[in-house]
Image (cartoon, grey):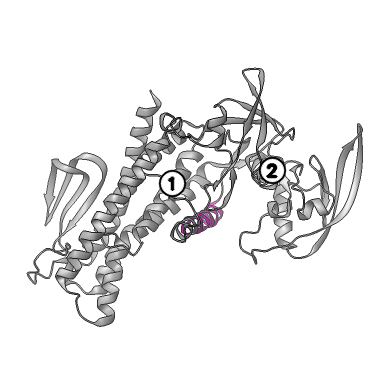
Amino acid sequence: MPFALTAILSMLVVLGIMVLVHELGHFAVAKFFRVRVEVFSVGFGTRLFGFRRGDTDYRLSLLPLGGYVKMAGENPGEERTGDPGEFASHPRWQRVLIGLAGPVANFLLAFVLMTGYYMMHNEVEQYLYGPAVVDFVPPNSAAAHAGLQSGDRIIKFDKDQNPTWEKMRIRSVLDANSTVPFTVERNEDGQTKQFSSDLYLLDTTKGQDFEIESLGLIPRYQTDPLKVHDVEPGFPADKAGLKAGDIIQSINGQPLHSVPAVMAFLQQQNGQPVTLNVDRDGKPQSLHVQPTWADNGAGQMGYRLGFKANLPPFRVEQLPLSAAVSRSISFNLHNSGYILDVLHRLVTRRSNVQQLSGPIGIARDTGEAITMPGWQPIITLMALISLNLGIFNLLPIPILDGGMILLLLIEGTIRRDLNQQFKERIYQVAFVMLVLFAVFVMFNDVSKFNIFSKLKP
């Protein structure tokens, strides 16, 4: 099947599920509070077929892009009749809960997806349980000042003998903001030597998401060099000629075996051009690339080349329910924080709006995820999209759930309804702004295609 068709179909299915779950949340709570739901539609547009039960028309519609719920009297322009089944006839606190139900349903979906994944098919990177070999040590990092070098194998870290990276990560959290002794094995002039020193584990996060990489300890994920899975259109790697399937033997002569190692190397180069030594179909090539300053996809700014690597070796394990729930909560909290950080950067203009993606970008991501091996890419992507949808709908923008909730809270504070014409004007302006935003995001997606990137100077 052509990639374009795979991308479109996978996007329709994924977005359809996300929107349908969102509307189910509104539907369930509205029914609970006895709000008259006139329509529950799977899809949009022309009604194809369905059935009526009670006051609700359950229908399948023509356009398979999620669905919608139509409640009696929910639109600001509708005339109020005083019918107790109308949305506006219910107490404000009930209407707030109905508005919250959609985003909450998306959050629950993300939680359930990741819990089920961790219970049934949790892919754990193998490097976590192998020897703790250092891939790259950035100059001026704490690890570099302690004397650690690329290729060192850590054979003692505090009290742990021959620790794995998993034990190293746990130990570093326990010993944060203290000095720990360590010993490494190092190959010099064909001989294996031992080197011992002390490392200060500075934790600048104050206990929040402390990672050992912040010390300059970049783990070696695999012994093989990085293989390029995909190149992002319009980014430096694409402009330099890097292609999917290329094997990156080294960057500026430095062998690197993971994306975090590449990212750390680019940061210490401070934006200077780099040379990729690439193996393409058995033939060596050198590509000169000028890194760009951009979001790394997790809400953090840094120098990037713009490619995705093949997943490192992993093994599959099944977690018990309690551990899966804990891991899922951690995943969703962390990624919700990343999404909020990106939104904050956009509002404060510390991040480029051109990094936003719309339906076309989502189609590209879902197409890639569905074609990648294993369940992890597509389930993780679905959870992230569900989180994005939930958070986006909570933004205090009229038409969105968050805007409706904000107006209800304002009315509750002043203890009277806002002027109906005033609310209608607010919704009209918000609708136009959202349409313009959607057009901009879609144009932004299209501009990332190779045909347009070649037209740029």
Tag 2 secondary structure = helix
Name the foreground residue: 245 vs 23: 245
- The spot of residue 234 in percent (x, y) is 48, 35
**Residue at the extreme top:** 282
- Relative height, residue 190 to residue 344 (above, below): above
Image quadrant containing the N terminus = top left
Magenta stretch prevailing secondary structure: helix
x then y, percent, for residue 341: 50, 58
Residue at 48% in and 49% down? 114
Disc 2 designates what residue? 265
Q: Is residue 18 left or right of residue 419?
A: right
- In this view, the residue in front, 163 or 135, is 135
Q: Distance of mark 1 from mark 2, alpha carbons?
A: 25 Å
* Residue type (three-letter) at the residue carrying disc 2: Phe
Which residue is identified by label 1? 354
Looking at the picture, how far across and down is residue 170, in whole percent? Answer: 70, 56
Q: Give the range drawn in magenta.
A: 320-340
Could you classify mark 1 by the number of other residues whose Cα lies within 10 Å: few (under 14), some (14-19), or many (20 or more)? Answer: some
Figure quadrant of residue 185: top right
In screen coordinates, is 11 left or right of 162? left
Tell whether position 326 is magenta.
yes
Residue 34 makes an appearance in the image: no
The kind of residue tagged 1 is: Gln
